[in-house]
Image (tube, grey):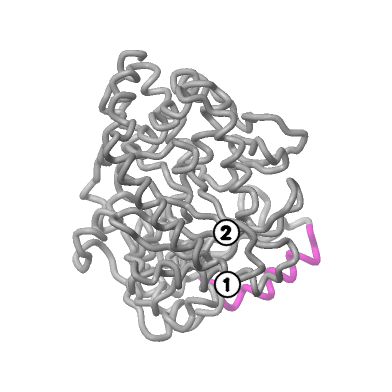
């Protein structure tokens, strides 16, 4: 294992040229923002944050975070408006745009490097007013706590997570953030110890120190806020993948676990895929991702209520105008009848009510071996496409986040399979009908 880790370590440290170039871009951005904050007395300072400031960045995808510090007394409205003005004005040459966390922030690209201008309040630990208030404290804490060797171990971990598709805190990914990577290395000291520990981790195990109880599959405590569980933002699917690939690496250390591994798509299940496609008016990527994830979850519930078994589901957007809600069904066509259990015959009032309400609208009724009165009912829809099309036409308010109602009213398409899908959408949809790459390492 040590030999493989050593090989990876040599590849993840940015070269001196890349480091020099990144510093030049960061200093340029800082000067632009520095000049702009002079107009606003509410802003009292600015500083670098994130992986760039902590020295844990990967050369291929290092963002530069510039945090602007606001007086604690600044209203939320001013906090948002002024920070956007600063971001847009300072980065106007670089086509800035708004991104969203709890509060909006401005992002732009300078020579393929993302620059994030993020506002935060000048508050004490525990007196948080915005989601970003902890971030500068994270930076100070990690700069002080991580040794130079640990910083490289963080880079190894990030590469491992990224290669297996589980790195990134954005809502589209719900993976392991850069800060979580740092916290894990800080707790376990190096990548090897982390792999061995995660391989044997127990359900609801706590990494870090806290007196609070959390109900997530694992718990990762923020070292500067013992009441905060960093794992709450990571999906169970991604935690599961991390555990499995850690076990695979522990059992048989090899370099291909640090390279992207494609999932194995089963082509015979394309006809089990229900696709809902619609166009939306432009909005922040974070907003549209949140909306389509909620819509997918809601429509999965409606499909189940309609008698269709949803095996897996996911959503996808190009972040420009198209969105897809994808459902892998056990079958897209189901029986035209279904049975419904009523009360048992000993319950006089309930059984009488059930019989009188259902007797006229059923196919059959009988007393089952379980002592319950059972009715056989006819389904209105046995075809998933017809069911979903009618539901979206007549029950949009029930199954859709309010922010998507106007988009769906402009039109949508419900289909089966991959005939109308572009190559990139086929790849996304194909993940639903594939064996996960994390499982293939055990083959």
Q: Nearer the viewer, mark 2 or mark 1?
A: 1
**Residue ID at (30%, 45%):** 21
201 vs 416, left or right, is right
> Percent from the top left, x then y, of residue 206?
65, 30
Tell me the tag on residue 68: 2
Q: Which residue is mark 1?
A: 39
Q: CA distance from mark 2 to mark 1?
A: 13 Å
Question: Which residue lies most toward the top here?
Answer: 2
Q: Earlier in the sequence, mark 2 or mark 1?
A: 1
In the rendered image, is residue 332 in sight?
A: yes
Please tell me in which quadrant of the rendered image residue 215 appears. top right
Span colored in magenta? 347-363
270 lies above or below 355: above
**Residue ID at (42%, 85%):** 409
Residue nearest the observer in this picture, 432 or 94: 94
- Circle 2 — which element? strand
65 lies above or below 225: below
Residue nearest the observer in this picture, 2 or 242: 2
Tell whether position 333 is magenta: no
**Residue ID at (33%, 31%):** 13
* Quadrant containing the N terminus in the rendered view: top left
Magenta part, dominant SS: helix
């Amino acid at each position: 294992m040590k030999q493989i880790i050593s090989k990876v370590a040599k590849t993840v440290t940015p070269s001196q040229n890349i480091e020099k170039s990144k510093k030049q871009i960061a200093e340029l951005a800082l000067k632009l923002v520095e000049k702009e904050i002079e107009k606003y007395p509410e802003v009292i300072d600015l500083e670098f944050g994130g992986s760039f400031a902590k020295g844990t960045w990967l050369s291929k995808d290092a963002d530069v975070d510039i945090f602007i510090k606001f007086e604690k007394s600044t209203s939320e409205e001013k906090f948002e408006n002024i920070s956007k003005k600063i971001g847009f004005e300072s980065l106007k040459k670089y086509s800035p745009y708004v991104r969203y966390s709890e509060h909006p922030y401005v992002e732009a690209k300078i020579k393929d490097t993302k620059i994030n201008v993020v506002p935060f309040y000048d508050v004490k630990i525990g007196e948080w007013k915005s989601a970003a208030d902890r971030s500068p404290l994270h930076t100070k804490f990690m700069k002080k706590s991580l040794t130079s060797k640990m910083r490289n171990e963080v880079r190894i971990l990030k590469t491992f997570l990224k290669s297996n598709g589980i790195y990134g805190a954005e809502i589209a990914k719900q993976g392991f953030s850069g800060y979580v990577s740092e916290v894990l290395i800080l707790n376990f000291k190096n990548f090897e110890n982390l792999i061995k520990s995660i391989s044997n981790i127990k359900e609801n195990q706590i990494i870090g120190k806290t007196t609070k109880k959390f109900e997530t599959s694992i718990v990762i405590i923020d070292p500067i806020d013992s009441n905060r569980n960093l794992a709450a933002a990571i999906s169970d699917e991604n935690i599961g993948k991390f555990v499995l690939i850690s076990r695979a690496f522990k059992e048989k250390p090899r370099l291909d676990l640090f390279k992207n591994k494609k999932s194995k798509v089963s082509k015979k299940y394309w006809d089990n895929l229900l696709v809902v496609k619609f166009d939306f008016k432009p909005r922040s990527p974070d907003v549209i991702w949140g909306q389509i994830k909620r819509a997918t979850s809601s429509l999965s519930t409606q499909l189940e209520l309609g008698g269709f078994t949803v095996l897996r589901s996911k959503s996808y957007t190009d972040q420009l105008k198209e969105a897809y809600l994808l459902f892998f069904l056990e079958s897209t066509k189901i029986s035209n009848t279904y049975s419904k259990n009523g009360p048992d015959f000993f319950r006089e009032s309930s059984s009488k009510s059930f019989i009188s309400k259902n007797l006229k609208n059923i196919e059959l009724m009988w007393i089952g071996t379980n002592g319950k009165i059972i009715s056989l009912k006819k389904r209105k829809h046995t075809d998933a496409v017809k069911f979903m099309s009618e539901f979206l036409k007549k029950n949009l308010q029930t199954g859709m986040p309010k922010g998507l109602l106007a988009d769906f009213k402009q039109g949508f398409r419900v289909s089966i399979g991959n005939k109308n899908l572009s190559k990139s959408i086929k790849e996304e949809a194909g993940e639903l009908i594939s064996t996960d790459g994390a499982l293939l390492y055990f083959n």
